[in-house]
Image (cartoon, rainbow, N blue to C red):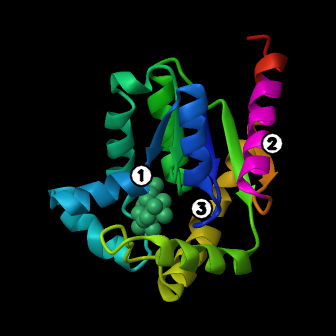
Amino acid sequence: MILIMFGPPGAGKGTQAKRLEEERGLKQLSTGDMLRAAVAEGTELGLRAKEIMDRGDLVPDDVMIALIGERIEAPDCRKGFILDGFPRTRAQAEGLDAMLSGKGRAVDHVIELMVDESALFERISTRASESGPDAQRADDTAEVLQKRLTVYREQTAPVLPYYEARGLLRRVDGMADIETVAAVIAGVIDEKTRAAGT
Ligand code: AMP
């Protein structure tokens, strides 16, 4: 099963993806985490990505498509995976489809977590205050969040119609508590699985 968690920064994509990883054995692939690991290791990718991430912009599509393309080849992705933070542009969505169709696979579900923007500022400041000094994200500030939201509205949200047109998109109220959101997502996945008779 291939699932995409969609939504603005702070919507709860990572939290829900982690739960699905534990409950369903699907691998969580967070491109943000992958990039932060590259930054911490000081790799060529990390050096290139750091400045872009710190200002809240997007790392170029070709870099991201290659990164995900390589990652999904790993054995731990065979059963399925959850994309958390990818695709973030139409070009990434098309690149993903091209990669998957080459392997006879396809995206099964796209879950959009819908949240109020005002709540995002609160959530991000809570995340920043709860992170220890080592886990503190340079981009979890009000200023950079503003930029990340603009990027989300202008470059990422326009990907939604691409999936909606194919009947893959399900909108979920991300303002509810974690348990409720998780239950709704589980229902969406199970309903589609039953409908497909698999
Ligand atoms: P995230 O942890 O998903 O909020 O991502 C943190 C930052 O990593 C983003 O603000 C971008 O700079 C970069 N990033 C993560 N995923 C992508 C992606 N799919 N495309 C481009 N940039 C990304």
Marks 3 and 1, the one that precedes in the sequence: 1
Q: Main secondary structure of the magenta part?
A: helix
Marks 2 and 1, the one that precedes in the sequence: 1
**Which residue has dot 2 on it?**
184
Amino acid carrying mark 3 in the image: Thr
Ligand 1 located in image quadrant: bottom left
Q: Is residue 153 above or below residue 80?
A: below
Q: Is residue 132 covered in magenta?
A: no
**Which residue has dot 1 on it?**
31
Residue range of the region highlighted in magenta in the rendering:
177-192
User: Dot 3 lies on which element?
Assistant: helix
Q: Position of residue 40 (x, y in %)?
A: 22, 61
Q: Residues within 10 Å of mark 2 (few under 14, many from 20)?
A: some
User: Dot 1 lies on which element?
Assistant: helix
Q: Is residue 187 covered in magenta?
A: yes
Q: Position of residue 115 (x, y in %)?
A: 75, 66
Q: Residue furthest bottom?
A: 143
**Which residue has dot 3 on it?**
156
